[in-house]
Each structure stands twice: as structure tokens, then as C-alpha cells.
Amino acid sequence: MSQPPTPEPGVPVCYRHPGRESHIRCQRCDRPICPDCMRDASVGFQCPDCVAEGARTTRQGRTTYGGIRRPDAAATSIALIAVNAGVWLAIMLTGGGASRLVDLIGLRPDGVCAMGGFYDLRMTQELCERGGTWLPGFVDGAFWQVLTSGFVHIDLVHIGFNMLALWILGPQLEHLFGRSRFLALYLLSLLGGSLAVLWLSPEYQLTLGASGAIYGLFAAFAVCIRKVGGDLRQIGVLLAVNLFITFAFPNISWQGHLGGFVAGLAVATLLVYAPRGPRRTAYQLAGLVLVALVLLGAMALRLAV
């Protein structure tokens, strides 16, 4: 293959390809660029370095409630669904409802000793380990359960309905709030559901599932509709149906649903009604920290009773 001719002395050459003659200059830095380095601009062409610099310094668009606007508003929901599906698969591969994972990462307010299919409420952990299986609880130091329980499912219908709701509501809320605010809403709603379980559920009852977080998303969606003066009847009907299911069928934690809804309502109200302006993010962050401290404080108080 023949080599391209060397440009004559004094002829401008591309700053990135010195062997190429160039008579086009970047509109920003005025350096000569060859056809391979030309990037379309509003006027003329720019070099790759100036295009990259412009992308770094251009202010990113903001969502309705102050978050950074990203092209894929479903990314966080997809990641959360993937985590839930991964945990469900791990549980199925290790025994389903009998999996040790369920007892370790599901939420139980107080630990209990399982012996021969029965619970012995008199057994301490030390005595239980001599012949039974200790099922740890939050009060015994299994603090991680308040978070991990929100990613635990056993029944296929249970995870199916929760993930469908997340797929429907999540991208819309992330589009309004932005990624970090949406994730804070989801996790604080989850913790709110766990808090209600710690205080209101039977002390040895195992609770699991993402329903607390999902109810928080329902609450946030209602707040957003109310803020713009929209029609709340559709979300109201959906909530009514879910409340009916919550109380009409056994083995459904109304405590987790209630706690998640209240926490989601508080978080969404803080995000949506924070004053607009340069300090909106600071107000929102302070509100989120306050909600988190209240939840953690109430959980710590549960240890003392």
C-alpha cells in the first residue's frame, strides 16, 4: 500500500495526524483538523478535544424535582429488579421456603429457636445451638435484616406482582426525581416498612418482600399527581385494590405496607415541595437525612424495649 504524500513545508497539517494536510480549522481552538477529526458543530466543525471539553462543561439538564436528567430513566428499576430476581433464584436453588437464606436475611423482630419443626420460645441462642436451629432476629443483632428482607421473595406470584409494580412505577418516578432521589425514595420506603414490622408485627414472625418499598412508590406517585393537580382517582382505585388484598388474604404484612406507604409519603412530600431555587438540593438532602435519622432512631429504640 502506498503511503500518503508528505505535506509540503508551510502547509497546515492536522494537529492529531501530522501527516495529513488540512485547510479546515476547529471553530473553538482554531487548530487545523483533517476530515477524520471534524465534528459537526452549530457553526462549522470542532475537533474531538473541544467536543469532549464542551460535554464536560455543559450543564446537565435537571428533572422536574431537581435530579440530573439521564437518558435511561429505567436503569435503577432494572437494577433493583435484577437484585430481587437474583436473591429469589439463590433461594430457589438452596431449598426454596426451607432455604437457610430465608431465615438469615428475612426480617424477624426477635430471634427464636426452631426444634423439630416447632419454636421453643424459652431457648436462648446458646442453648438452642446444642440441638436446634437458631433463627436470628433484629433484636439479637441481625440488623441487616431491615434492609435485606426487602429483597427476599419465595412465592413466584409475590415477586411477580412486586416487580411488575416496580417496572411500571419506577421509571416514571425516576424520570421525575432523578436516579439518586428515586433510589433514596425506594430504600427509605423499604426501611419504613421494616420499622413498622419491628414495632407492630408479632415478635417472632418472619416478614419478607419488597412490598413496603412498592407502597412507598405508590405514595410518591400520588404526591406527584397531587402536586400538578392531576386526577387521583386512578391511583386511588389501585391503592384500594391493594389494601383489599392486604387485609383479605392471610400471610400478608399490612405492617410493612403501612410503614412503606407512610415513609414514601414523607420522602416524596419533601422532594416535591422543597422550595425551587439554588438551595433546593440542600433542602431535599436535609429532609432525606432527617427521615433516615428518624427511622434509624426508632429502630434503635426497638432494641431497648
Image (spheres, helix red, strand yellow):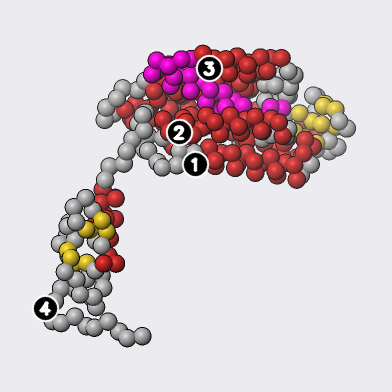
* Relative side of 33 to 157, left or right: left
Residue positioned most to the bottom: 2
Numbered badge on residue 75: 1
Q: Which residue is mark 2?
A: 174
Q: Give residue 121's position: percent from left, percent from top.
A: 79, 24
Q: Give the residue drawn at x 63%, y 16%.
A: 241
Q: Which residue is mark 3?
A: 234
State whether residue 295 appears in this view: no
Q: Give the residue drawn at x 23%, y 75%.
A: 20
Observer-side mark, 4 or 2, equals 4
Going from N to C along the chain, the mark reached first, 4 or 2, is 4
Question: Where, by quadrant of the figure, is residue 100 drawn?
Answer: top right
What's the amino acid at mark 2? Answer: Glu
Whole-number angstrom distance, CA of label 4 to CA of label 2:
56 Å
Whole-number angstrom distance, CA of label 3 to CA of label 4:
73 Å
Observer-side mark, 2 or 3, equals 3
Whole-number angstrom distance, CA of label 2 to CA of label 1:
9 Å
